[in-house]
Image: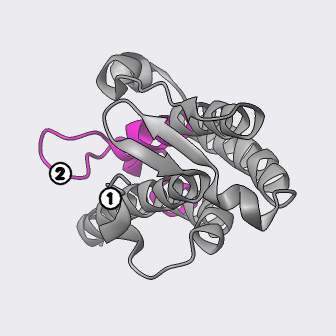
Amino acid sequence: MATNPYATQLGDGNPLDVINQTPGKLNRCVQTLGSAGLKEPWAPGKWTAGQIICHLADTEIAFSFRIRQVLAEPHHIIQPFDQDAWSKGYSQLDPQLAAQVFAALRGWNLALIKTVSQETFEKPVSHPERGQMTFRTLLETMAGHDLNHLRQLETVATAYSRRAI
């Protein structure tokens, strides 16, 4: 069984609680940062808050597909993607629209996940780079990914609000 790369972010947290709460937290970050704050990077040379939000929307598209493929196919092999290649146009996109897309997709994904039986959480899936996983691991990865990027957004919001004072 593969090690979940986001396990340290999730800790003992319930992945379903985290993925359910993320849209609201993301919306609060967008509101707190405003247009100017969304242009601030979370660290020198890193993505801006707006680019992180665009990445979250794109990643939710990928997770949407992965969830459905895992549920529909036996022993599905997850298709990885190059986040750096996907991110090339983020500076030209509207992060507020990205947050709306994320929230809509996440709501749709949660509706589907709530229909899944307990046995399905142990359904095997594999990732070419991470090895054998389960459907549960996929959800833990979503949650840990959310937490990772929410922390980055909170870092931007804290630094931005200190400068604005």
Q: Quadrant of residue 73?
A: top right
Query: Percent x, y for residue 86?
Result: 41, 20
Q: Residue at x 41, y 24 (%)?
A: 81
Q: How many marks?
A: 2
Q: Is residue 122 magenta?
A: no
Tell me the element at label 1: helix
Q: Is 155 on the left-hand or right-hand side of 13?
A: left
Residue type, numbered disc 1: Gln
Q: How is the image coloured?
A: one colour
Q: Is 127 on the left-hand or right-hand side of 118?
A: left
Query: Percent x, y for residue 163?
Result: 24, 65
Q: Residue at x 75, y 47 (%)?
A: 109
Tell me the element at label 2: loop
Q: Is 54 on the left-hand or right-hand side of 123?
A: left
Q: Is residue 36 magenta?
A: yes
Q: Quadrant of residue 19?
A: bottom right
Magenta residues, dominant SS class: helix
Residue with the mark numbered 2: 43
Q: In the rendered image, which quarter contains the N terminus?
A: bottom left
Q: Which residues are magenta?
A: 30-57
- Indicate which disc, 1 or 2, sits on the residue closer to the N terminus: 2
**Within 10 angstroms of label 1, few (less than 14), some, or many (20 or more) residues?**
some
Residue with the mark numbered 1: 152
Q: Residue at x 43, y 61 (%)?
A: 144
Query: Percent x, y for residue 121?
Result: 66, 60
